[in-house]
Image (cartoon, rainbow, N blue to C red):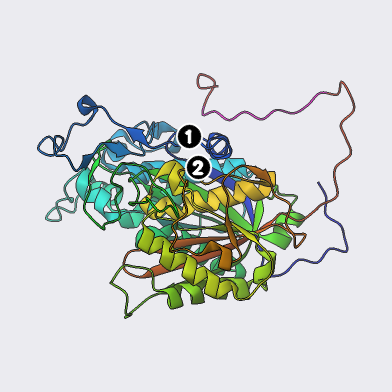
């Protein structure tokens, strides 16, 4: 497609030109979206013989054998990236998944990693606990090559620098550890770097692998883990969420440059904002409505977006009544007194709580919704929590798949992530700009198909 020559683009707009997603029940972004639009729940309920840990807990009446497992999390071909077998064995699953996902996002955007021009920044969120569960810290008494290699493979800090190095790129590498808001923080930092001209393209994402894998959880009254293994966003019977694993990455570029380069655009990041609760009247780790509201409002303000033009709100939606009540209160304050309606949903009902990649699942859902112009349903919502007075807000729970026909004439979505420790993040995404369509191909004319493989045998 080619752009209209007279079209002007907001200099603050950032295009999403490539995406990669692996989630419970989905090895690709297409499978992920298909699961969402068909209302499938991908949290698994494990058999006892599948669980190799928690033997002393497995018969406890409060032990819940549910989790969002990730197929293939332990499968890795180091030869693709020129990684030694020793290095690969020492790399944590998150390190391995992230380098694969970053590569896949580049390819999805149409870029050969060996021929990417300019500076590419990589920003990623991971869970520092994974490294400790995967193996013991490297022996710092020795600083020989083997110890150094082990340290680089094992360290959570080097997840992004490993991806940069082994994909063969130059640019910034920033690993963030901001709890369950990590994905949003990575995207926010990536957009800042692009808009400041520090990088030409950016890969932003998050990776989470719960170890040991798979395992359930122990339910505790009033905590965030679900009593029955199901997450029920905004539901009166909600008791939290099961834990899950996954990886999501996005390839980003300033919109004007992406259009000039004839990139494929899935969606546009109009604005992003982050903040922290700091000291507040709420318990440490719970959403603080005033601070979360300020974060949501700031993201809209940065993008020059008015609330009445946002017709999809993808919530953090933990499925615990107190947290969902606080979140809806916060976003209602941020939206103010508007007359339009806004679909509200939560992806945790489908895939559980992915920790640092939870916001990535929500952002992927919104990106695909914009791309397909379709609103996916929120599952496990049968009776809305009466403490959430939805009729007095602009928000209407999305219970079924539907064509997305916004009253404002443009499709925009807001996505919130909340992390323990008071971390808040919000993204505002917009549908890709309308570009002039390429002339249809002549009937019978050969078409170009692209294949990617390391060598002839792999092909």
Q: Residue at x 30, y 38 (%)?
A: 66
Q: Is residue 449 magenta?
A: yes
Above or below — where is 286 with respect to 59?
below
Q: Earlier in the sequence, mark 2 or mark 1?
A: 2
Q: Is residue 377 magenta?
A: no
Residue at numbered disc 2: 21
Horizontal side, residue 214 vs residue 4: left or right: left
Q: Residue furthest left?
A: 56
Q: Residue at x 25, y 27 (%)?
A: 47
Disc 1 element? loop
The image position of residue 126, as x and y in percent, is 36, 54
Q: Residue at x 74, y 52 (%)?
A: 405
The image position of residue 333, as x and y in percent, is 53, 75
Horizontal side, residue 409 vs residue 292: left or right: right
Horizontal side, residue 342 vs residue 425: left or right: right
Which residues, given as a range, are shown in magenta?
446-454
Given residues 318 and 186, the one toward you in this image is 318
Given residues 70 and 176, the one toward you in this image is 70
What is the C-alpha distance between the residues marked 2 and 1? 8 Å
Residue at numbered disc 1: 26
Horizontal side, residue 125 vs residue 451: left or right: left
Q: Residue at x 60, y 41 (%)?
A: 108
Q: Are marks 2 and 1 in contact (CB under 8 Å)?
A: yes
Question: Mark 2 or 1, which is nearer the eye?
Answer: 1
């Amino acid at each position: 497609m080619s752009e209209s020559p007279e079209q002007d683009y907001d200099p603050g707009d950032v295009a999403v030109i490539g995406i990669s997603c692996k989630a419970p029940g989905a090895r690709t972004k297409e499978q992920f979206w298909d699961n969402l639009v068909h209302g499938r729940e991908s949290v698994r309920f494990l058999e006892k013989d599948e669980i190799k840990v928690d033997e002393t807990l497995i018969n406890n009446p409060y032990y819940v054998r549910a989790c969002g497992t990730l197929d293939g999390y332990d499968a890795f071909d180091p030869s693709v990236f020129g990684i030694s077998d020793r290095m690969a064995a020492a790399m944590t699953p998150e390190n391995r998944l992230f380098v694969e996902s970053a590569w896949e996002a580049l390819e999805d955007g149409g870029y050969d990693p060996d021929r990417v021009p300019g500076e590419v920044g990589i920003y990623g969120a991971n869970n520092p606990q994974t490294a400790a569960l995967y193996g013991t810290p490297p022996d710092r008494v020795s600083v020989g090559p083997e110890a150094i290699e082990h340290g680089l493979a094992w360290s959570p800090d080097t997840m992004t620098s490993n991806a940069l190095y082994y994909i063969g790129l130059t640019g910034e590498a920033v690993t963030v550890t901001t709890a369950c808001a990590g994905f949003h923080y990575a995207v926010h930092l990536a957009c800042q770097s692009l808009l400041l001209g520090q990088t030409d393209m950016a890969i932003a994402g998050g990776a989470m692998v719960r170890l040991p894998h798979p395992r359930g959880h122990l339910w505790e009254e009033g905590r965030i883990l679900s009593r029955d293994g199901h997450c029920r966003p905004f539901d009166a019977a909600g008791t939290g969420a099961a834990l899950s694993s996954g990886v999501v990455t996005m390839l980003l570029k300033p919109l004007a440059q992406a259009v000039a380069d004839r990139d494929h655009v899935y969606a546009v990041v109009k604005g992003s904002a982050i903040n922290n609760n700091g000291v507040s009247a709420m318990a440490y780790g719970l959403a603080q409505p005033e601070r979360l509201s300020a974060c949501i409002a700031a993201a809209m303000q940065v993008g020059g977006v008015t609330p009445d033009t946002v017709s999809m709100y993808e919530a953090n939606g933990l499925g615990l009544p107190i947290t969902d009540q606080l979140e809806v209160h916060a976003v209602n304050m941020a939206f103010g007194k508007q007359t339009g309606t806004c679909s509200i949903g939560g992806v945790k009902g489908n895939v559980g709580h992915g920790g640092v990649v939870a916001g990535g699942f929500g952002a992927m859902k919104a990106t695909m919704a914009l791309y397909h112009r379709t609103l996916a349903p929120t599952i496990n919502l049968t009776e809305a929590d009466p403490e959430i007075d939805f009729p007095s807000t602009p928000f209407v729970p999305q219970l079924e798949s539907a064509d997305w026909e916004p009253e404002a004439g443009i499709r925009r979505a807001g996505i919130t992530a909340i992390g323990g420790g008071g971390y808040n993040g919000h993204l505002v995404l917009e549908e890709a700009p309308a570009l002039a369509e390429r002339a249809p191909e002549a009937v019978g004319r050969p078409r170009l198909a692209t294949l990617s493989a390391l060598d002839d045998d792999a092909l």
